[in-house]
Amino acid sequence: MINCLSVSNYRSLLKLVIPLGKLNLITGANASGKSNLYKALRLLAETAQGGVVNALAKEGGLESTFWAGPETLSNSMKRAEVPIQGGPRQKVKRLRLGFSSDNFSYSISLGLPKPSDSAFSLDPEIKRECIWGSYGDSNAYRPAASLIDRDSSLVKVREGREWQVMSQGIASFDSIFSQISDPDRTPEVVALRDNIRNWRFYDHFRSDVDAPARQAQLGTRTPVLHHDGRDLAAALQTIIEIGDSNALADAISDAFPGAQLGVAIREDGRFAIEFYQHGLLRPLSGQELSDGTLRYLLWVAALLTPRPPPLMVLNEPETSLHPDLLPALSRLIINASERTQVWVVSHASRLISALERHDECNSVCLEKRLGETCVLGQGMLDEPHWIWPDAGK
């Protein structure tokens, strides 16, 4: 489980460190930084997929993601300094992302490349990556706890009390997760990579008339709902056969008293939703469902997954749902948090209220101060202790 997330110099997140629990609720006013925090977590996930450089390019390039506000003496990020031969020390910008989990902590530092004639001269470079052991309540980086250390193109691995060079030529756009993954020499890299690759992100499900979830689709066993919900019927049938079918039935009746859910298996192997409501003589098909009903079924399929991930992130799950459905959705989320770590980004007061009544809910409210995203009510002594490795050359 991730117990701490740290982001530095990313959009409105100049210096943010937040504690995390099993069920995490991220709230705040519009433009308070909720979306930026969500995007930062997505960037962290891209490191294990080998796509962090491409993801930054889609955001307009690294330079456009840097903090653009003022730096003050009381509330600023101390930028790394690198010496220039024969001249003064020069400040350089770094985007830094990191987290600590029960076993290992990880951080990555990205910066702009040196000027060159390459057609890819605007691509960001990975300047530093570190993995260190997590001990007790401490999240802070300590050289003595470091297990993997990547500084520019040099990667070192700790073997016993000694450092061994693993690579001297790793490309600036490649993460250690894609290049240094020896299960014998670097089991920490393999363990963290596999964990991060299993994180699941569910954003805005499509519910328009042409949405894939409304259409009959070729069905195969689907323990994990696709992020766009295209395999909804197959995912629901998988829950019925190998998941918790009673929880599925309860989730439907909780939101729609007297209703039942069915999945029609056609001769050509396509699966289609059948939604039975009290008083109707025939079931409703996927094309006939309201946007809110379809989205609720999508959340049911995601949250009742027979294969719970290490982390499930739900971005504004209240979209298109009638307020009366939010208590039922909150109960689904709370039950899911017993099997996996859940992160919910929301501004729906009724959903927020329902989740915050749960004893295990870690509620984080964001606010803006002079353009900087901060945690409401978090003082210096409340912030988890976090120390970054040097930002890299």
Image: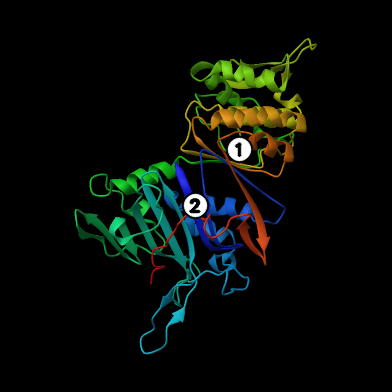
The C terminus: image quadrant: bottom left
Q: Is residue 348 above or below residue 130?
A: above
The N terminus: image quadrant: top left
Given residues 252 and 238, the one toward you in this image is: 252
Quickly name the residue at label 1.
228
Q: In which quadrant of the rendered view does residue 114 lie?
A: bottom left
Numbered disc 1: secondary structure: loop
| Residue shown at 52% from the left, 21% from the top | 238
Q: Amino acid at mark 1?
A: Asp
Q: List x then y, in percent, for residue 61.
A: 56, 65
Numbered circle sitting on residue 330? none
| Residue shown at 35% from the left, 43% from the top | 191
Q: Nearer the viewer, mark 1 or mark 2?
A: 2
Quickly name the residue at label 2.
5
Q: In which quadrant of the rendered view does residue 187 lie?
A: top left
Given residues 164 and 51, the one toward you in this image is: 164
Q: Mark 1 Cα within 10 Å, few/some/many (few <14, many 20+)?
A: some
Mark positioned earlier in the residue sequence (1 or 2): 2
Q: Amino acid at mark 2?
A: Leu
Q: List x then y, in percent, for residue 65.
A: 58, 64
Q: Is residue 182 above or below residue 62?
A: above
Q: List x then y, in percent, for residue 346.
A: 67, 43
Given residues 221 and 218, the one toward you in this image is: 221
- Mark 1–mark 2 contact, CB under 8 Å? no
Numbered disc 2: secondary structure: strand
Left or right, 309 with respect to 130, comes to right
Q: Is residue 196 above or below residue 350?
A: below
Residue 322 appears in the figure? no
Q: List x then y, in percent, for residue 320.
A: 74, 36
